[in-house]
Amino acid sequence: MDYFPLESSKDILSIDEIKEKVLINYNLNVLNIENIKYKDTSKPRAVFKVSTDRGVKCLKKVYYDEPTLLFIYSVIEWLNFKGVISPRFISTKKGLKYVRYKNSLYLLTDWIEGRKCDYDNIEDLKLASENLARIHLYSYMFSPIEGSRIPKSESDFVQSLNKHFLQLLELSNKAFILKDKFSRLFLDNFDYNIEKAQESVYLISLIDFSRDFGDRVSKKAICHLDYVNKNIIITPENKLVVIDFDRTAIDMPLHDLIYYFRRILKRENTSWNFEIFKTAIESYERVRKMSYSEHVALLAALMFPHKFWKVSRDYYRNRKECNRDAFITILKKISAQQEKHDLFCNQFKIYIEEKFKE
C-alpha cells in the first residue's frame, strides 16, 4: 500500500461537505451532524456527532497517517477481543477502516453514551484502575496488522528526572537574580521541592531499566498514554469504555500509571490522598501484579515536584508575555499542598516496605 503525507491545512470541512464527501462512503442515512470539537493546532483534528438511521455515530478527523491509524485499529481490535471495550472502527462500503478526503483521514465509530469517570467516586476509580491493568496485562503477544507503524515511547525515566532536577537548580539561579514576586515565592518553597527532587533522582537511579524488572509486560505493553477521566466513559449499564487511543504506543506500564495517578492526586478534592491512591493501586494489582522496582519507580515519579518544576519553568520561559499574577496564584496552590505531598510520600514508602518486607 502506498502512503502519502497528510496535508498541513487546518481548514475544517463544512457540514454539507462532511455529509456528501465523507459519510457518503458508509452504509447509513445521515439525519443530523453536529460539530463537537475542533482543535486548531499543529495537529488539527475534529469530532462530529452524527445521527443516522443506524444510531448515533462519532466521526473523527485525525492528524496521523495510515500506518499509525492501522496500529491504533489493531490495538482497539485486540483489546475488544480480550474484553476491554473501546469503540471499533466502522467499515466503509468498500470494507476500509477510514476515509481519505482532501488528503486527510476520517474514521467512524459508534457514539458512546455515558458519563466521564468521576475521580470523587471510589467505585469509578476501582473500575478505571482494574481496566488499565487489563490493557497492560493483555498486551502480551499483541502484534499489529501488516502496514502498521508501531509508536514506541522514548521515555528514559532516569534521564528525565535528572534533567528536571538540574533545571530546578537553574531556575533557582534565575529567581535569585530577578527577585520579583514570583521568584520570592519560588525561593520560599525551593528547599522542600529540591529536597524531594533529589530523593526522587536517587530512588530512580537504583532501578536497572535495561532489564525486565517485573512481569513479561513490565517493559513492553500497550499504553494508552492519555488515560484520564474524559477518555474513561461509564455507560448507563455501568460498563467502562475507553476512548481516544490517539497517543497509544508500546511503552512501560509505568508511563501510563504515572500519568494516571498524577491527574488524580493533583486535584483539590483528592490532593495527595494516600487512601484513595492505595485503593486505586490495589484495584490495579488485583488484575496485574507490580514488582518492587515498579513501585519504587512510581514512588520516585510521584515524589518529584512535577507541577512546581513545570509551572516555574513555564513562568521563566514566558515571563515577559505571561500573566504573572496567574502564575503566582498557581504556585501558591501548589505550595499549599506540600504538607499533604510529604505525608503521601512517607506513607507510600511505608506501604512499599510492608508489602515487600519478606
Image: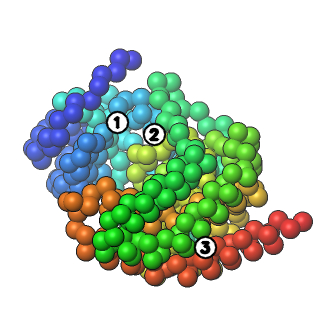
Q: Which residue is mark 3?
A: 277
Q: Where's residue 159, x and y in %?
A: 57, 46
Q: Where's residue 128, x and y in %?
A: 54, 65
Instruction: Depth check: give the residue in front, 276 or 305.
Output: 305
Instruction: Depth check: give the residue in front, 93 or 207.
Output: 207
Question: Which circle's residue, 2 or 1, is located before the other in the chain?
Answer: 1
Between the C-alphas of marks 2 and 1, the distance is 10 Å
**Residue type of the residue flagged with mark 2:** Ile
Q: Which residue is mark 1?
A: 64
Q: Residue furthest right?
A: 358
Q: Residue furthest front?
A: 177
Q: Is residue 333 left or right of 122 when viewed as pictured?
A: left
Q: Which residue is mark 2?
A: 72
**Residue type of the residue flagged with mark 3:** Phe
Q: Is residue 274 left or right of 57 when viewed as pictured?
A: right
Which of discs 1 and 3 lies nearer the camera? The answer is 3
Q: Where's residue 142, x and y in %?
A: 61, 37
Q: How many marks?
A: 3
Q: Contact, CB < 8 Å: mark 3 with mark 2?
A: no
Give the colour scheme of this rendering. rainbow
Q: Where's residue 298, x and y in %?
A: 63, 60
| Category of crowding for the residue at label 2, using alpha-carbon neighbours closer than 10 angstroms: few (below 14), some (14–19), many (at least 20) | many
Q: Is residue 81 left or right of 6 when viewed as pictured?
A: right
Quadrant for residue 332, please give it. Answer: bottom left
Residue at the image point whose x is 38% and y is 60% from the top: 174
Q: Contact, CB < 8 Å: mark 2 with mark 1?
A: yes
Q: Is residue 303 depicted above or below 120 in this figure?
A: above
Residue at the image point whose x is 68% and y is 76% from the top: 346
Q: Contact, CB < 8 Å: mark 1 with mark 3?
A: no
Which of discs 2 and 1 lies nearer the camera? The answer is 1
